[in-house]
Image (tube, rainbow, N blue to C red):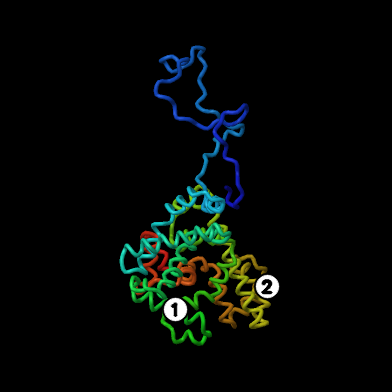
Amino acid sequence: MSVDGRDESSGNGDATAGGPVPPQVPSQGGRGSVPPGGHPADGSVPPQRAWREDSVLPPRELPPSDADLIDRMRSGDDTAYEELYRRHAQAVRRYARTCCRDAYTADDLTAEVFARMLQAVRGGSGPEHAVRAYLLTSVRRVAASWTRSARREQLVDDFAVFAAQAARGAAGSDDDTLELGADVRAMHQADRSLAMRAFRSLPERWQAVLWHTEVEDESPSEVATLFGLDANGTRVLASRAREGLKQAYLQAHVSATLTDDEECARHADQLGMYARGRLRTRAERGLRKHLEECAKCRLAATQIEEVAGGIPAVVPVAVIGWFGAAGYAKAAGLIAGGAGAGAAGA
């Protein structure tokens, strides 16, 4: 699959006439036609491998992406579900453990989350690319449903309080959030932020690669399998997603200023070119004058280059919501197996 999501043929390995032949491991004993000296009887040098006409080795077959596995799940392929479980169960179980009193309950919660995803996918909904974020969000939702049953006793007290407050905040007005706990208020505020609005406007594939590389701080080589790419292809995808996020953040800022201030709206669409140093001299002079007078646009101009750095702080709180008394830094470490703690500092 290409970076843009298009399927590309990787070949079936058959040596057809005129077609590429993948490199093979040489046999231990050699071919009978090759004498012990290592050269054919006619004195010619044996070819090392078959080459393409453009001298590029045939691409190796990449593992199926998460999106491919989801498609196969919809068609009833149980092996695809098993592979997704192997890829994501450890991270889901770690996060579930922050909600539960013991590891056995976390195992039960993990199993129910995957079962619900399977049911959703077979029903035509569920995730397409952002499987990890979907599963982690489901942990919070399933655990919240447990607070209304006897299973409440198996959850940590802090989470039970969080779930009750979050439900009350969702049902009430914005003013009611002032009476909620700090963690619930943070979730509501992050959910309404420009950065989160920009993130949610991106294609799900871009959201997914940003989640893994920015939130969980995983390397492209670590997450390449999830996208059906190699490490270089994943780097390109992540770079495009970060650039798309900056553009989406700009658009979110423009949309906000259009309803707030006419003067800001006139300059808002110039911020992207200004941040990249591509604004013409006269236009830049006018924008600089506005920025000197407008703190809101000045802040937006600064944040454009830094918006990707804010993703580790804003997106997990808005998407998942629960990180318990330990705070996000420890929770990110639990999710990413320790790698996310560095991202949390951003």
Q: Quick check: 94 above or below 191?
A: above
**Marks 2 and 1, how far apart at CA:** 43 Å
Residue 49: % across, % down:
52, 28
Amino acid type, label 1: Val
Q: Residue at x 65, y 68 (%)?
A: 279
Res. 283 mark: 2
Residue density around tag 2, few if under 14, some if 14–19, many if 20 or more, within 10 Å: few
The answer to whether one can see residue 232 in this image is no
The answer to whether one can see residue 283 in this image is yes
204 on left or right of 220: right
Query: Is label 2 in a helix, a strand or a loop?
Result: helix
- In terms of sequence position, does the residue under pointer 2 or pointer 1 come before the other? 1
49 on left or right of 344: right
Res. 8 mark: none
Q: Quick check: 328 above or below 46?
A: below
Circle 2/circle 1 CB separation < 8 Å: no
Residue density around tag 1, few if under 14, some if 14–19, many if 20 or more, within 10 Å: many
326 on left or right of 213: left
Image quadrant holding the C terminus, namely bottom left
Residue 303: % across, % down:
53, 71
Query: Is label 1 in a helix, a strand or a loop?
Result: helix
Residue 234: % across, % down:
52, 52
- Residue depth check, mark 2 versus mark 1: number of the one nearer the observer: 1
Res. 184 mark: 1
- Nearer to me, 260 or 196: 196
Q: Residue at x 54, y 58 (%)?
A: 121
Amino acid type, label 2: Ala
Q: Residue furthest front?
A: 150
- Nearer to me, 191 or 110: 110
